[in-house]
Amino acid sequence: MAANLKEVRNRIKSVISTQQITKAMKMVSAAKLRKAQQAIQQLRPYANRLNVTLSHILAGGNAAAGLSFGKTTAKQKPLLIIITSDRGLCGGFNANILKLAFAYIKEHYPDAYASGRLSFLCIGKKGFEYFKRRFPKANFITEYQQLYSHHDFAQIAALADRLMNDFREGTFDQMELYYGRFKNAGTQFPEREQYLPVEKLPEAKGSQAKMNADYIFEPNQQELLEELIPSILQTQLFKCLLDTQASEHGARMTAMDKATENAEEMLGELRINYNKARQEAITKELSEIVGGAAALAG
């Protein structure tokens, strides 16, 4: 019985220690979430409006600078940009992004993988580890993994410039982003977004079909688009990274909060079991003492 009590005591100490860790991780994630949430909420409306503007420009067929990024391709050389976290302990956050990308590859790019034309650019370690195991024959661009934890806009802009250059030269003819879209601390969505070629807006119907975006360019249309379009694509990539980081912190905070609650429930059950076992031990000892005294008196 003493051994059983000692085992329960050790389990209680272990659960208390784990609960302290999950509480600390929850507090850290909550602090990081506030900063990340503020950043994405400030950037997202700007980035979304820029994307709409770019789609309008390409839909109108304005300038060769824009047309090079909006041309239709055969999707024979796809590059998938996978944005995940470097660490786990954030519920199903990473798994949901990876499952979305995996299902899309199986449906749309089996021939590209079989012929060695499927490529991955993974920002964050989890995506690289997942797809390296499942698609060992694919091509991997590995020098940008660390950008998830250590980045600024200049680094993301340099990566976007490389991607645009690769698309222009025909190294890749289809680029897609897979990331986590942040809604609130408890809700995050895996998202697929086409990066290049830029998707045109769907054709309007009825009276809206007669309304075309008419932009006035100053000083020069070609010169302005050569600066504007790369800037829009840089901002889009940066927005996806900030979205994923906010989603990660929200998912980890929620997961650690649930883990803390589960630890509390487990502690309650263990303490009840410990008290029961202790009471049984005391009752047994008292019975032995009473029985021994009765035997001596007899």
Image (cartoon, grey):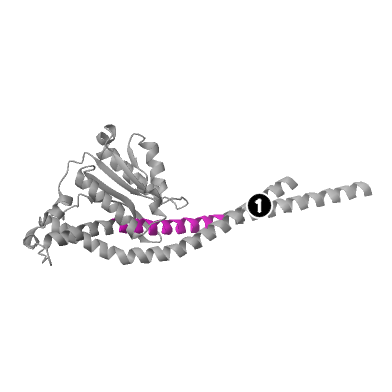
The answer to whether any part of residue 1 appears in the image is no
| Image location of residue 270, percent across then percent down | 63, 53
Q: Is residue 83 magenta?
A: no
**Residue at 18% over, 51% down:** 69
Q: Secondary structure at mark 1?
A: helix
Is the residue marked by circle 1 packed among few (<14), some (14-19), or many (20+) residues within 10 Å? some
Q: Which residues are magenta?
A: 237-263
- Where is 184 relative to 12, above or below? below
The kind of residue tagged 1 is: Asn
- Which residue bears the numbered disc 1? 273
Q: Position of residue 138 (x, y in %)?
A: 32, 37
Residue 298 is situated, as x and y percent measured from the top left of the image, at 93, 47
Horizontal side of 46 relative to 73 (left or right) equals: right
- Magenta span: predominant SS is helix
Residue 241 rendering spot, x and y as whole percentages = 34, 56
**Residue 274 appearing in the image:** yes
Left/right of residue 12 with respect to residue 24 in the rendered view = right
Given the current orientation, which residue lies at the most extreme right position? 297
User: What residue appears at the point 60 percent right and 53 percent down from the top-left corner?
Assistant: 15
Question: Residue at position x 75%, y 47% from top?
Answer: 2
In the depicted structure, whether residue 169 falls above or below residue 50? above
* Relative height, residue 113 to residue 121 (above, below): above
Question: Is 247 inside the magenta-drawn segment?
Answer: yes
The answer to which of 19 and 131 lies nearer the viewer is 131
